[in-house]
Image: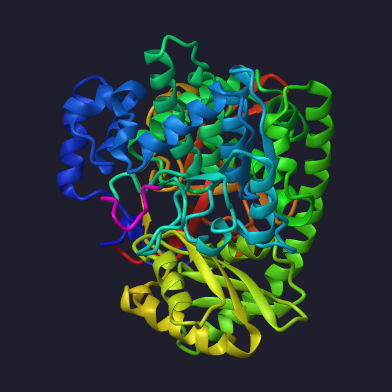
Amino acid sequence: MSYLGVSQSATGRRWVGLPASTERLAEAIAQAGHPLPLARHLARRGVSPEDVPAFLTPKLRDLLPDPLRLKDMDLAAARLVTAAQKRQRIAIFADYDVDGGSSAALLIWWLRALGQGATLYVPDRIDEGYGPNAPAIAKLAAAHDLIVCVDCGTLSHDALAAADGCDVIVLDHHLGAETLPPALAVVNPNRQDESGDLGHLCAAAVVFLALVQANRLLRDAGAPCPDLMTMLDLVALATVADVAPLIGVNRALVRQGLTVLARRSRPGLRALADVARMDGPPTAYHLGYLLGPRINAGGRIGAADLGARLLSTDTTAEAEALAQRLDQLNTDRRAVEARVTEDARAQAEARLADGSTLAWAAGEGWHPGVVGIVASRLKEAFNRPAVVIGLRPDGFGQGSGRSVGGVDLGACVQRLAAEDLLVKGGGHKMAAGLTVRTDGLDAAMARLDALLSRQGAADLGPKDLSLDGTLMPQAATLPLVAALEQAGPFGQGASAPRFAFPDLRVQYAKLVGDGHLKLTLGDGGAGRLDAIAFRANDNGIAAAVDRAAGAPLHVAGRLETNRWQGRETVQLKVEDVAVAAETEVA
């Protein structure tokens, strides 16, 4: 049965509430003194009453896995310690995204604390593509004793074979093949011979675990150890930006990392927070939507190493200069993205209307630095796996894909590469990259469509909107928002508390920014609530508000604290609306 009678909202979704069994669990949690809205959210997350205290205050020491659970970890950590202690020449080969940059920065800060430097190498997205390549590896190997590949390398068999006479360590999380590349150690929770229990870790978390084990070895030898807890801001940033699920140890890593970030002690992140005009205590939202995109902008349309350099610099002046450059690149990136998104969405809509399972699009000259973001937009719009490909004049296309929960896109892309339908491809469950011959594009996408369909992607439609209950505007207070935030951080795999506010009338509405809708909502009495609906012009919310023409609306969204000029107020981030008169009788 739909919640509040909303079977098809402005965004095309059915609203669903908590089942009776979950409501009973919520009541048991509330009896321990927790606000009922928080209790309902915890119950939806499956938290038992006895586990509530540990869930609300997750401790990293209780959740951090033993690094030695990962294969080759002993070899990797020992080799890192040897290289640092013997002052050997170390090169770090990193991917050009936030996860790669954060991973490289973690190693650089750790080595710096031991008085050791490292050479940073980040491949150019256009000229070199993703991951190690033989010329770069051969050049690094000739001048170094150790190469550490972070957030890449698991599938780079030929490239790593070029590291003649130089040890190679791979610290990665992308899906592995049946055979491993020629390296001293390949530490990856998504190796074929791993259990997969830690498969939700991003590369920076894998690097962090390697450094935990390295510190153990240093401690056993009576040597000083770098303080890893001060580096958790980098792990948190990578975890959120790489859309890793915020469950288990990931949740604890991000929570503690946000505390470290709030101290503003890392020059690069401090400078970037300032140019992004980040106000108030940092949250997962800031990591994913303010800091992450700016760091990614360097690898997307600028110099590939800008993000890693920003995160690893210990100089304020350099940090400020890099942050300003990344901020400008991010502005440029948004303009490029907007042009590609419009064309890609039209293609995807047409293909889905023709029965395609996959929302995909391809275009001449589409910048490879934005295809991943555009794929994310298509995935969000259609709740289907999405692939966006930029076609090059040389007869090849470079693309990125994003998936939805329960559909393993990375495995499908890897299978296409094994079948020679792709030049290369790989990734993980939620994201993948690929290179395809233009003349084989249709065949590759048809095969990918068929593989995804077997996983149930063809049966997906607009997602139901799960709600934790109903609130009235008077109940939306700052203390309630603070209580709800205890269940955070929120993000992939850990949706924020979401409530319905029934029968509200729009007292004020104004389009702001890039199609966002700012609202003041009232219940006909003293209750008022400020709200904002992002991309309201695109998702149907603005049209529904106009259609209501002053009639009551059911409004759904999450509560947050709005900070402006030193003042804090409650704001509703609107995710959906339904005109009350148009809803069915429940």
- The boundaries of the magenta stretch are 188-195
Q: How is the image coloured?
A: rainbow
Q: In terms of secondary structure, what is the magenta stretch mainly?
A: loop
Q: Is residue 14 visible?
A: yes
Res 241 → quadrant: top right
Classify residue 185 as left or right of residue 328.
left
Q: Is residue 522 visible?
A: no
Q: Is residue 274 magenta?
A: no
> Between 477 and 295, which is closer to the camera in this rendering?
295
Instruction: Residue 414: give x, y in percent of width and height.
Output: 44, 70
Residue at the location (21% across, 28% down)?
51
Classify residue 63 as left or right of residue 555.
left
Instruction: Residue 359: give x, y in percent of width and height.
Output: 52, 76
User: Could you tell me which quadrant the C terminus lies in?
Assistant: bottom left
> Between 393 and 266, which is closer to the camera in this rendering?
393
> Between 360 and 91, which is closer to the camera in this rendering?
91
Residue at the location (42% across, 62% down)?
404
User: Could you tell me which quadrant the N terminus lies in?
Assistant: bottom left
Instruction: Residue 266: give x, y in percent of width and height.
Output: 66, 22
Judge whether 230 appears above or below 311 on screen: above
Res 538 → quadrant: bottom right
Res 9 → quadrant: bottom left
Q: Is residue 189 magenta?
A: yes
Instruction: Residue 197: give x, y in percent of width and height.
Output: 28, 46
Q: How many marks?
A: 0
> Between 583 and 298, which is closer to the camera in this rendering?
298
Residue at the location (49% across, 26% down)?
81
Residue at the location (83% across, 45% down)?
328
Judge whether 417 appears above or below 432 on screen: below
